[in-house]
Amino acid sequence: MKSVFQKFGGIRPMAAKLGGVPASTVKSWHTNRTIPQWRHASILAAAAAHEIELTEAELVNVSADEEEAEPVAANHEAEGAAQEGSAAA
């Protein structure tokens, strides 16, 4: 599941969509994985205005950013190439 920040497109895009909230403030929320309760209503309003699906629960329990999974096959191919290179040395 995407984090609140990913749903807004990142830290700076989220700050811009919130209008007047400094990116450093949003970065602090991201780092600490907590958003002050008094900000929730304005964040939910901004999400609705930008057609972003977001719930109060996501603001209370801020999840970490979703990692983009690297394809397993590509990972094994890279490992195999590294092993072949070290065997040739």
Image: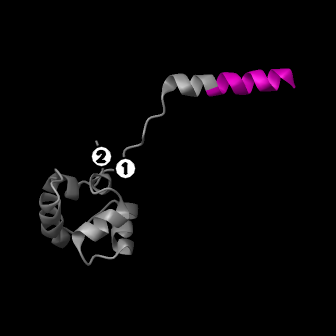
Q: Amino acid at mark 2?
A: Lys
> Looking at the image, do the residues carrying marks 1 and 2 touch, with CB atoms under 8 Å apart?
yes
* Majority secondary structure of magenta residues: helix
Residue 12 position in % (x across, y down):
36, 66
What is the crowding at mark 1: few (fewer than 14 residues within 10 Å), some, or many (at least 20)? some
First-in-chain label (1 vs 2) = 2
Q: Quadrant of the image for the N terminus?
A: top left
Alpha carbon distance from label 1 to label 2? 6 Å
In the rendered image, the vertical position of residue 19 relative to residue 2, given as above or below: below
In the rendered image, the vertical position of residue 20 relative to residue 77, given as above or below: below
Q: Residue furthest right?
A: 89
Q: Quadrant of residue 47?
A: bottom left
In the rendered image, the vertical position of residue 79 relative to residue 8, given as above or below: above
Q: Quadrant of the image for the C terminus?
A: top right
What residue span does the magenta drawing correspond to? 78-89
Describe residue 41's horizontal placement relative to residue 36 as left or right.
Answer: left
User: 84 and 39: which one is in front?
Assistant: 84
Is 83 magenta? The answer is yes
Residue 11 position in % (x across, y down):
36, 63
What is the crowding at mark 2: few (fewer than 14 residues within 10 Å), some, or many (at least 20)? few
The structure residue drawn at horizontal position 37% and vertical position 49%, both measured from the top left corner, is 65
Residue 79 position in % (x across, y down):
65, 26
Q: Point out which mark residue 2 bears.
A: 2
The structure residue drawn at horizontal position 32% and vertical position 52%, both measured from the top left corner, is 6
